[in-house]
Image: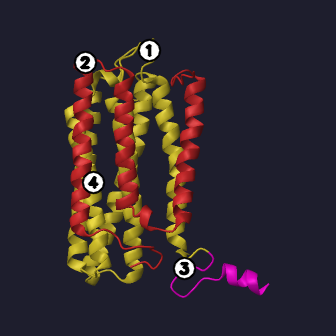
């Protein structure tokens, strides 16, 4: 459809497989929520949940939004916006003590 | 001068020659990129107040229905699958397939919105937590409400494309690009929910 794609997009069967992966990751996230209630994993819970969310985020952006098949200019625009927003608000949350960044 | 003219020239099929990317598509990506700042502000606002003690009334984190929200999240996630299948069908000029998947996506979006209306109603009627109960409740309603508004706009755009395709027996190549742009918007709404589901619901902590 568009001429700017650098490689072929996934096939419908690959899209279904990606959806299964996303569903499994979501199930793991919800399971972790309940495991944390019982075992109180502490900071590990946050690290695992944020990692899983980031993984889902990257899968949707890369494969469903086709960013990994597009020209690098689009990736740079999108990544710049994400990093700018994340960095900006992490600074605010750190300054107000909501997010604690532990150094050596 | 001629070099400048070449750089800014637009080809017949709408591509900007200096980038090789269709202008509307580039515009959509830039718009979505800027939306990170919008939702980032709302998520930050929620994190600032979500578990700060000292306010009267119910806190959102005390009344979340995680199983219900998990199902809603799953529904929205699967709508991304149907959206990309609609785009794939359109790129193969399978007009019936594109129409079917477009309608499925709009339906799943509507189910998600119905779930959100149910959740809001439950919070307001049963738990008496409204927009003005406390800053935590206010931040929750503003964040999830704005996300819901984005989903509602997406559903309207999807139904418009579906209606257009039904009326004209399919979408032209130009309208096919519209489908791709609506798809990008829809996936973006999904990834924002991925973040909200984790940060707001699963990592919720009781007020201290």
Residue that appears at 55% across and 20% down: A97
- Find numbered disc 3 in the image and state the secondary structure of the residue it sits on: strand
Measure the C-alpha gap from mark 4 to mark 3.
31 Å
Residue occupied by mark 4: B109
A41 or B138: nearer the viewer = A41
Quadrant of residue A39 within the rendered picture: top left
Chain under disc 4: B
- Find numbered disc 4 in the image and state the secondary structure of the residue it sits on: helix
Magenta span contains residue B12: yes
Q: From which residue to which does the magenta span run?
A: B1-18
Q: Estimate the x, y position of residue B177 in percent, counting from the top left.
A: 41, 75
Q: Is residue B192 left or right of residue B6?
A: left
> How would you rate the neighbour count of disc 4 (Cα within 10 Å): few for under 14, some for 14-19, many for 20 or more?
many
For the C terminus of chain B, the quadrant is top left
Q: Which chain is red?
A: A
Disc number at residue A39? 2
Q: Is residue B23 left or right of residue B81?
A: right
Colour for chain B in the figure: yellow
Residue that appears at 26% across and 56% down: A18
Quadrant of residue B17 within the rendered picture: bottom right
Disc number at residue B15? 3
Residue occupied by mark 1: B55
Chain under disc 1: B
């Amino acid at each position: 459809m568009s001429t700017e794609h650098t490689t072929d997009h996934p096939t419908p069967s690959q899209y279904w497989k990606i959806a299964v992966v996303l569903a499994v990751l979501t199930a793991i996230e919800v399971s972790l929520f309940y495991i944390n209630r019982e075992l109180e994993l502490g900071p590990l819970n946050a690290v695992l949940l944020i990692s899983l969310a980031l993984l889902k985020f990257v899968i949707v952006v890369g494969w469903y939004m086709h960013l990994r098949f597009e020209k690098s200019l689009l990736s740079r625009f999108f990544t710049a916006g994400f990093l700018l927003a994340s960095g900006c608000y992490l600074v605010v949350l750190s300054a107000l003590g909501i997010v604690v960044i532990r150094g050596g | 001068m001629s070099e400048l003219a070449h750089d800014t020239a637009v080809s017949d099929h709408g591509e900007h020659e200096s980038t090789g990317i269709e202008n509307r598509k580039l515009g959509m990506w830039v718009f979505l990129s800027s939306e990170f700042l919008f939702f980032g502000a709302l998520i930050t606002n929620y994190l600032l107040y979500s578990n700060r003690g000292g306010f009267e009334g119910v806190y959102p984190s005390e009344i979340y229905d995680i199983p219900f929200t998990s199902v809603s999240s799953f529904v929205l996630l699967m709508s991304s699958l149907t959206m990309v299948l609609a785009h794939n069908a359109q790129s193969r000029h399978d007009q019936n397939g594109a129409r079917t998947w477009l309608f499925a996506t709009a339906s799943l979006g509507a189910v998600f919105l119905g779930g959100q209306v149910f959740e809001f109603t439950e919070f307001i009627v049963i738990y008496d937590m409204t927009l003005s109960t406390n800053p935590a409740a206010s931040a929750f309603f503003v964040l999830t409400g704005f996300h819901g508004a984005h989903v509602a706009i997406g559903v309207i755009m999807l139904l418009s494309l579906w209606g257009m395709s039904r009326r004209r027996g399919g979408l032209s190549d130009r309208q096919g690009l519209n489908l791709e742009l609506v798809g990008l918007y829809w996936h973006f709404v999904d990834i924002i929910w991925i973040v909200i589901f984790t940060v707001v619901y699963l990592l919720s902590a009781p007020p201290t």
